[in-house]
Amino acid sequence: MSEAEKEIMLDLLCDKFVYGLDENESKQLSELGFDAREADSIEQTIAALGLVDLDSEAAMPAHLQAKVLRSADAFFASETSAAAAEAADDELPSRQIVLSGGSGSSWFSWLGWGFATAASVALAFVLFTGRGADNRAGVQPTPTPIPAERLDPSQQRQRLIDSSPGEVIMAQWGKGNVKELEGVSGDVVWSDEKQAGYMRFKGLAKNDVSKETYQLWIFDETQDPKTPIDGGTFDVNSDGEVIVPIDAKLKARKPAAFAITIEKPGGVVVSDRKRIAVLAPVKPTST
Amino acid sequence: MAQGILNKIAAGDKTAVEECLKKYGGLVWSLSRRMLRNSDDAEDAVQEIFLDVWKNAGKFDEQQSSETTFIAMIARRRLIDRIRFTSRRISADALDDVMAEPVDRADKTMQTSLEANDAVKALNSLRPEQQQVLQLSIVQGLSHQEIADRTGMPLGTVKTHARRGILQAREFLGLGSLDSAKEVHA
């Protein structure tokens, strides 16, 4: 390989792991040829450099963690299904499948055919429903994987309040700076201990999802007021009472106020606070 | 030596899944949000990434890389696929958001892992223009053309800084010392 070709090859490898390659670039790289160890080391370098400036406080939201755990259960169950099928083939003609014994720590051991089949279906469901566990009332309805106990958002909210009545804080929504939304009422409840909460609204207008979204901000006493915690975005597509679970991106330790702003679709990292839909200062009272 | 999380997952130890999420969930979530700039997309991506992690846990070789780097590699592959599929690579417009992120959070910036610390050192070891190009491309996701437009560097110079910077950082991180290393000093 000439020096010029080598430069092109290295450029393509770097591009591959920073941006990805299109069909022509992939073909060109393939034609040039490259050392797999070279590619691996470049990919590792880029992955390591990509760790720079990541925010360690950006903890994965609890509801997302729950989704990942559910999909992990389903994935490993489907793996078990495949393992069981192999075992069955090995055991033919008796069709006796040994799923017990062996390593006590193996979680493959406690699953049987029926569960494995069901889990495979569950995996497909989890994978193909995307944000399936999103259960905001009055908000874009999406399929919900079957939980152990079905509670609607109102019941979930009540359960949170009942679970630790002295600890859960509640604040009433008041007007922000958007004249059309001055009539919005409702409240927000939050548990520091459970890092969970719910917002309840009456009169919050439906938003045009192609143009804007609502975004919650949590002003925590431990956080600089200039950088409130992103509480997640949500859309409203129905009238009447709307209950939205809070999706805090960071751990909120002592919220002093909650604010809803109107932002571009997808939300923003820092709000310009030009359109504050509602505000809820926390008073030192509990539910 | 204690068995790593990925090895435990590959061996079917269910407790390691939660351990993995606890240790690397923030990294994957943070990386996804930064690269996709959209929480909903990031949520979908995180689920896909961890599915890839479960699938590939058996391929992890601690002699080749750390768990952090391995998971970051899996995450980046998936995120790049999503970005290319949706053609929604972070744009110069979105950069305003990045720049608007608070700068007074040094105490909370992710330097929780040795890898992140080493990466910062590797980046700092480069020439300023190389640092700038890698910061804008790998960290902030700008294309080479966007970097050229933003910095005023010719496109070819941006590419050269990117390539040489990556190869030099690789040397610094001790990840490779093949013939191409000579190219760094060309």
Image (tube, rainbow, N blue to C red):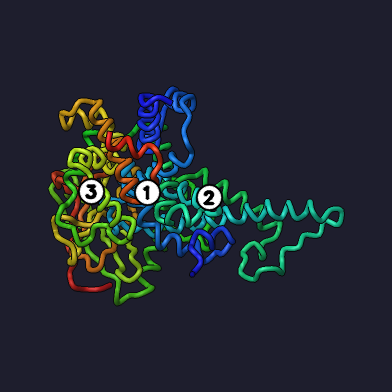
Residue A245 badge: none
Report whether mark 2 lies on the same chain as mark 3: yes
Separation of marks 2 and 3 at Cα, in angstroms: 32 Å
Residue drawn 35% across and 29% down?
A7
Q: The C terminus of chain A appears in which quarter of the rendering? A: bottom left
Residue in view at x 59 percent, y 61 percent? B11
In terms of secondary structure, where does tag 3 sit? loop
Q: Output the chain of dot 2.
A: B
- How busy is the neighbourhood of tag 3: few (under 14 within 10 Å), some, or many (20 plus)? some
Q: Element at badge 2?
A: helix
Check if mark 1's residue and mark 3's residue have beta carbons within 8 Å.
no
Chain letter of the residue beneath label 1 in the structure image: A
Residue B125: give its label.
3
Query: Which residue bears the numbered disc 1?
Result: A138
Marks 2/1: CA–CA distance:
39 Å
Label 2 packing within 10 angstroms: few (<14), some (14-19), many (20+) = some
* Quadrant for the N terminus of chain A in the image: top left
Residue B103, horizontal then vertical, whole percent: 15, 52
Q: Where is residue A272 in the image (x, y as percent from the top left)?
A: 14, 45
Question: Which residue is identified by label 2?
Answer: B56
What's the distance in space between the residues labelled 1 and 3, CA to CA? Answer: 53 Å
Disc 1, SS: loop
Q: Position of residue B92 (x, y in %)?
A: 22, 33
Q: Count all numbered tags in the image, as a single digit.
A: 3
Q: In this view, does A103 lie above or below B59?
A: below
Pointer 2 or 3: first along the chain? 2
Residue type for callout 2: Asn
